[in-house]
Image (cartoon, rainbow, N blue to C red):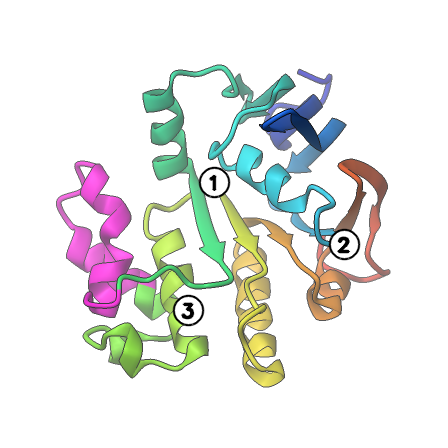
Amino acid sequence: MAAESQNDVIAECAAVSRVYSTGEVQVHALRDVSLTVHRGEFLAVVGPSGSGKSTLMNILGCLDRPTSGRYFFEGREVSRLADEQQASVRNKKVGFVFQSFNLMPRATAVENVYLPLLYSREKRRHDAALEALARVGLSQRAHHRPNQLSGGEQQRVAIARALVNSPSMLLADEPTGNLDTQTGAEIVALLEELHREGMTLVVVTHSLEIATRAGRVVTFRDGRVVSDAASRPGAPS
């Protein structure tokens, strides 16, 4: 791993490439990407569609493996772990938020939130889910199903679900993509609040609002990092 403080670095990609084979065609989704995510950082990942942003997210969250290169999480190389070990890292260490919410339609908000705890030995899953919903301001909607919630409320439920295991890092893929401008701004404000509380955030986005509020913006094009800089003076780091 690179010579940085292990306490400061939460995730590191070292010369990571990801190649997908479609018949006789090879698609180079990532090309020799080296990237470090620092603990407590608010990082926005931007770039055109097909630039490699979501592939990076999948590798950071142990949903996919590099074709070549190495991926470290909390000082441990996880890219070569067995599937079961990677699943444990995903469940205990990483929270995921997606554009489409990915809620179970027949489950209530609190049931959706405690789903990740079904795979652990957490005995307080109902209480933990209620606490996570309170954290995102949805205590009063705990027993409503997704079709009884607005888009913004559904995304808050998804964020609560991502937080219920107290993850080390939160990954969000276009978290405001299905929301109107005002509701999207409310979700951005919630993400900022989580960051101020110490959460490490990596957000893939096309949203200028998120990019300007993040402390750091990494730009991808054709599977490569083409820019890596602070978003603006005074942005949260």
- Residue 173 % position (x, y): 56, 54
Name the N-terminal-most of marks 2 and 3. Answer: 2
Name the N-terminal-most of marks 1 and 2. Answer: 2
- Residue 64 % position (x, y): 51, 31
Q: Which residue is mark 2?
A: 48
How many residues crowd around disc 2 within 10 Å: few (fewer than 14), some, or many (20 or more)? few
Q: Are marks 1 and 2 in contact (CB under 8 Å)?
A: no
Amino acid beneath label 3:
Arg
> Residue visible at 33% across and 46% down?
165
Q: Which residue is mark 3?
A: 156
Q: Nearer the viewer, residue 141 or 101?
A: 101
The residue mark sitting in front, 1 or 2, is 2
Describe residue 8's horizontal placement relative to residue 127 as left or right: right
Q: Are marks 3 and 1 in contact (CB under 8 Å)?
A: no
How many residues crowd around disc 3 within 10 Å: few (fewer than 14), some, or many (20 or more)? many
In the image, the segment drawn in magenta is: 105-132
